[in-house]
Image (cartoon, helix red, strand yellow):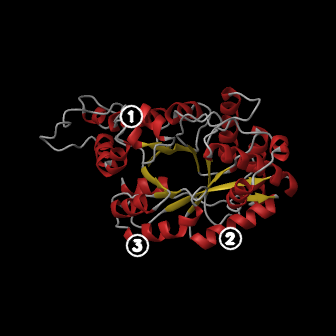
Amino acid sequence: MAADAAEEIRGTAHGTAPVPLSVLDLVTVGAGRTATDALRTSVGIARLAESRGFHRYWVAEHHSMPGVASSSPAVILAHLAAHTERIRLGSGGVMLPNHAPLVIAEQFGTLEAMAPGRVDLGLGRAPGTDGATAAALRRTDRLNEGADDFPQQLMELIRFLDDDFPDGHPYARIHAVPGPVQATSPGGVQSAHRPPVWLLGSSGFSARLAGTLGLPFAFAHHFSAQNTIPALDLYRESFRPSAVLDAPYALIGVSALATDDEKEARRQIMAAALNMVRLRTGRPGLVPTPEEAEAYDFSPMEREFVDSWNSNVVHGTADEVRAGLDELQKRTGADELMLTANAHSGDVRLRSYELIADAYGFPTAA
């Protein structure tokens, strides 16, 4: 079990990549496009990622954001499972305080039954939205309780996944199905395997918890770059070997966009940055076009934010992006890089992953 779990967690680097490369998908919706268009792009990127040797494909949970159509990761992952055969699929992540642990165990047990041996369960403790939307999701306005109770919710979820509540526990007779209980039922032939659990974070809390529990850790470098190295150091210092891992394993999410021309990369990331400006100022919308971003009159404060935001986006030609990713991996010591391409056009996003695969000499598509 431990060896199998570690093998699923630790990917294989292809070509000249220093570590395995993976994909984080926000299912972004550009102006003039629909959620259907965005989901079709996700299928296209997942197929490309699988054929070229990217290790895993994760979908992030967000709510009440018109430009992000990933409010239901489990539903999207089921769709992607039907269109892929080998690539690992997972959540990057499911926001645990938004859901009952039993519901997540059932959803990901179902995904595991659909795509045996290739499902990851990444968990976060943030709401993935604003406070009012989080209150609507959780049917409570006591939002701090959800974050404070995260370790307890996590252990409850893991016990549902493993079907191992102790005798006398109120949930001892409750089983997440599909799940291990089917293997122990009369005539049961269900695999007892369950998805590996990852902890996600943008600060030190989940880094320390993941280390203490001996779980793999994913850090959101793409929007919290100043905390990346302190969080990774804390994770490694806190790490205790477990039945899952005998040594730390950390990936970082990275905003990366490669285009055929450096100037075009700059145009594209400016549109994504304008989208973030609007989100941060309470005006969330669809991802604007590069033309709209070029015509937009940024205030001095907005310009400062954009410059800071874009400084952490690895962008340019394929060779420039490869050099930037190599430097970032060397600087952080990350065991895996998970790339997210934010752009208005699905074609631009698809082309970016193709260019990066080519730059590293990944296997060519069959």
The three-letter code of the residue at mark 3 reads Glu
Residue at 64% over, 51% down: 54
Pick whichever, 224 or 333, lies toward us.
Answer: 224
Q: Is residue 261 visible?
A: no
Say which label, 1 or 3, has the lower sequence index. Answer: 1
- Residue sitting nearer the eye, 81 or 229: 229
Label 1 packing within 10 angstroms: few (<14), some (14-19), many (20+): some
Give the residue type at disc 1: Arg
Query: Between tags 1 and 3, which lies in front?
Result: 1
- Pinpoint residue 265: horizontal percent, then vertical percent: 81, 53
Residue, disc 2: 327
Please name the residue that numbered disc 1 is placed on: 138
Q: Amino acid at mark 2?
A: Glu
**Residue 166 percent coordinates (x, y):** 17, 44
Asked where in the image residue 136 lies, by quadrant, the reply is top left
Residue drawn at (77%, 29%) of the image: 32
Q: CA distance from mark 2 to mark 3?
A: 23 Å
Q: Is residue 282 left or right of residue 266?
A: left
Report the residue marked by disc 3: 237
Q: Quick one: SS at disc 1?
A: helix
Q: Residue furthest left?
A: 168
Q: Residue 79's mark?
A: none
Image coords of residue 23 (percent x, y): 62, 49
Other-residue count near label 2 (Cα within 10 Å), few / some / many at <14 / 14–19 / ≥20: few
Q: Residue 147: tell me if it is visible.
A: yes
